[in-house]
């Protein structure tokens, strides 16, 4: 028995029992008051014949776009209060409408607009549109019914990309930073002489340089072989930081969002320039071995789409295990990160390990996504910011001394296109 | 605005205790008034104190009522105590209408006549209906206000929550009023029918009353079926 009915029944008994014992007609009539009230309550019908009008649509939009989800609630029968909850998925912003609503269905049919405008600052797949309706009984606190009404809209949010074709026009492609050796270590050998080295298992006998071996002398040691340049493609490895520092916001989006956007554009740009492009997330959770072609572009896009911020700051040295051979050939490494005194040390160590592993020294470009928040109270913000700046500058100098080029990108003040043309390519 | 959730809502503003305190005070006043004209109260006045200070018991009654109201005014959860006090004060008025004289059986001198009152049956019934009705209203108001707080804390706008609360309370009030009117109507009908039924069943009031009630219930069911368009 619901609680509301329980106390009503209790009141009836409280009056009825003494009335029966004492044969009191007035008390007997009074005991009927809760019973009559209960009877009248049962005649009231709660809201029913409810529908939410509006078809579930499919949207294909860019990050930052807004979608207007149009729905209409119609209640034809019954009377009473209704509680409506229009939830928005995580990582979205309700611009207008939405939230929770409590409605009263009176004698007339009720029609309510449930239109919502929602902004999507992050990429991903979202389902939105249905409403959770709770019918609250007028009397008593139990007997609430809940139902989900309406169809969901399916919204696929993509990251915005630059028009790569336009970027490839003119002198842009010739100014792109490329690996210093020009070619990678994979592919058939050309006739261009590169070096003489000791014989290794698997080398062709035809490549043994007998004259050089004889000149070197040292009986019993391995013969020397000629090494030729290979006709491979340029290798570019994009390393994407997915550590906790990338969760901080800049211009309404996280540093990771900006970084993913940048990585996507760079990957398209280098793939369009016939390079082998690979991807490595600092956490090591996702990586794509360097390769060329449209399929590779799709694979990188998918990995970037699924990239999430992790709790642990990853170590870039993990990339050695992911693609050791490609790294040995001295590829162009582009790191997209957000430099801070918290990750500079780890980055420096990782960079040293990478350099040690590389047989041929490759170029390392670090794109530093500048974050807005400092995370300190305003009264100590300035001294703290100065201290941070000093520590950061020292760390950056150490990275530069290791041969890395650090380029700052502030998404709040400059779009990536501008950064790419003026800073990244411009001086590269 | 928070990301990924409902918009921020203002904290719920509590209503004052007056909407609940007023019906409770009315019920207490009527109960106390019905008590003061009861014979048992008059007897108590004369017995407890010398005639010169008999007004003291009125003061004690008044002070008790005021203290309970003040406590309820300061702490809304104590409003229920007003109803408890009103019910206690109303007991002598109802007891006087009993058919079985238990006080005489228990050897109390005077018996039920001790609780006689100049009020008519209808007047006592109306006071009783007000007492029970306001108590029911109090319980429903508590429930509605609790729902209102919950709705606002869940993110509903205050305007919408207030609108719904007002509608609910109006329906509850009408419901209780109609229920009380039905009870009064039953009483009036029985008052009119009982002499007739008594004549029919050989002057047996004990039998006439339940029969009258059964007749009333039959009439209600019949009317409902006719309204619904079903055969009686």
Image (cartoon, coloured by chain):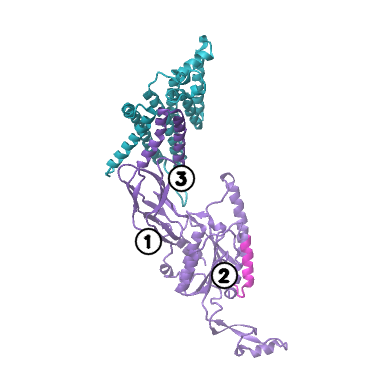
Chain colours: A purple, B cyan
| Left or right of residue A204, residue A414 in this image | left
Question: Does residue A280 sit above or below B66 in this rendering?
Answer: below
Tell me if residue A395 is in the magenta stretch.
no
Callout 1: 10 Å neighbours few (<14), some, many (20+)? few
Q: Which mark is residue B154?
A: 3
Q: Residue furthest front?
A: B202
Q: How many marks?
A: 3
Callout 3: 10 Å neighbours few (<14), some, many (20+)? some
Q: Under tag 1, what secondary structure?
A: strand
Q: For the residues carrying marks 2 and 3, which lies nearer the camera in this image?
A: 3
Q: CA distance from mark 2 to mark 1?
A: 44 Å
**Residue at 63% across, 88% down:** A209
Question: Does residue A278 sit above or below B55 in this rendering?
Answer: below
Q: For the residues carrying marks 3 and 1, which lies nearer the camera in this image?
A: 3
Q: Read off the chain for label 1.
A: A
In the rendered image, which residue does mark 1 sit on? A58
**Percent of width and height locating residue B81:** 50, 29
Q: CA distance from mark 2 to mark 3?
A: 55 Å
**Residue at 60% across, 48% down:** A383
Of B206 and A395, nearer the camera is B206
**Percent of width and height locating residue A286:** 54, 67
Q: Read off the chain for label 2.
A: A
Q: Under tag 3, what secondary structure?
A: loop
In the picture, residue A320 is in which quadrant? bottom right
Q: Which residues are magenta?
A: A345-364
| Left or right of residue A288, residue A96 in this image | left
| Left or right of residue A341, residue B44 in this image | left
Q: Under tag 2, what secondary structure?
A: loop
Q: Is residue B65 visible?
A: no
In the rendered image, which residue does mark 2 sit on? A363
Q: CA distance from mark 3 to mark 1?
A: 30 Å
């Amino acid at each position: 028995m619901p609680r509301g009915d329980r106390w009503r029944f209790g009141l009836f008994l409280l009056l009825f029992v003494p009335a029966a014992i004492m044969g009191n007609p007035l008390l007997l009539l009074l005991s009927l008051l809760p019973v009559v009230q209960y009877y009248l309550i049962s005649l009231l019908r709660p809201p029913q014949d409810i529908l939410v009008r509006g078809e579930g649509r499919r949207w294909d939009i860019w990050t930052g776009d807004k979608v207007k989800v149009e729905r209409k609630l119609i209640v034809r029968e019954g009377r009473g209060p209704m509680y409506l909850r229009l939830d928005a998925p995580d990582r979205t912003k309700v611009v207008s409408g939405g939230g929770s609503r409590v409605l009263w269905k009176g004698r007339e049919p009720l029609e309510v607009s449930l239109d919502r405008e929602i902004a999507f600052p992050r990429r991903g797949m979202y389902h939105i549109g249905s409403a959770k309706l709770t019918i609250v009984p007028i009397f008593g606190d139990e007997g609430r019914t809940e139902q989900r009404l309406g169809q969901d809209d399916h919204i696929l949010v993509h990251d915005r990309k630059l028009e790569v074709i336009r970027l490839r026009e003119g002198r842009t492609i010739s100014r792109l930073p490329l690996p210093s050796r020009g070619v990678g270590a994979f592919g058939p050998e050309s006739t261009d002489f590169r070096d003489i080295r000791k014989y290794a298992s698997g080398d062709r006998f035809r490549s043994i340089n007998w004259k050089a071996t004889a000149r070197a002398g040292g009986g019993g040691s391995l013969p020397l072989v000629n090494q030729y340049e290979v006709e491979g493609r340029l290798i570019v490895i994009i390393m994407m930081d997915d550590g906790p520092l990338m969760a901080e916001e800049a211009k309404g989006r996280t540093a990771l969002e900006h970084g993913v956007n940048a990585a996507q554009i760079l990957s398209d740009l280098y793939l369009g320039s016939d390079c082998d492009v690979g991807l490595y997330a600092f956490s090591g959770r996702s990586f794509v071995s360097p390769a060329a072609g449209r399929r590779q572009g799709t694979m990188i896009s998918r990995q970037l789409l699924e990239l999430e911020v992790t709790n642990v700051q990853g170590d870039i040295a993990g990339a050695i295990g992911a693609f050791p051979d490609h790294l040995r050939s001295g590829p162009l490494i582009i790191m997209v990160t957000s430099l801070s005194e918290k990750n500079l040390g780890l980055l420096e160590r990782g960079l040293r390990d990478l350099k040690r592993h590389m047989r041929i020294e490759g170029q390392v470009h670090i794109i530093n996504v500048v974050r807005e928040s400092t995370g300190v109270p305003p009264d100590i913000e300035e001294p703290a910011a100065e201290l941070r700046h000093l520590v950061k500058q020292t760390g950056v100098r150490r990275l530069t001394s290791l041969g890395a080029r650090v380029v700052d990108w502030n998404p709040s003040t400059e779009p990536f296109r501008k950064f790419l043309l003026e800073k990244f390519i411009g001086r590269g | 605005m928070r990301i990924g959730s409902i918009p921020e809502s203002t904290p719920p503003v509590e209503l004052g205790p007056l909407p609940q305190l007023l019906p409770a005070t009315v019920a207490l006043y009527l109960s106390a008034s019905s008590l003061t004209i009861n014979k048992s109260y008059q007897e108590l006045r004369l017995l407890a104190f010398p005639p010169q200070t008999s007004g003291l018991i009125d003061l004690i009654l008044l002070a008790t009522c005021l203290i309970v109201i003040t406590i309820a005014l300061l702490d809304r959860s104590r409003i229920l105590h007003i109803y408890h006090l009103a019910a206690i004060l109303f007991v002598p008025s109802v007891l006087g209408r009993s058919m079985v004289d238990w006080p005489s059986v228990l050897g109390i001198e005077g018996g039920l006549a001790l609780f006689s009152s100049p009020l008519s049956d209808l007047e006592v019934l109306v006071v009783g209906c007000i007492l029970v009705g306001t108590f029911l209203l109090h319980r429903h108001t508590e429930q509605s206000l609790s729902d209102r707080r919950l709705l606002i804390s869940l993110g509903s706008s205050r305007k919408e929550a207030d609108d719904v609360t007002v509608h609910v309370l109006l329906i509850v009030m009408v419901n209780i009023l109609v229920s009380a009117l039905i009870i009064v109507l039953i009483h009036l009908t029985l008052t009119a029918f009982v002499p007739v039924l008594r004549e029919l069943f050989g002057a047996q009031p004990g039998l006439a009353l339940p029969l009258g009630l059964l007749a009333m219930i039959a009439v209600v069911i019949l009317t409902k079926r006719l309204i619904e368009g079903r055969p009686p």
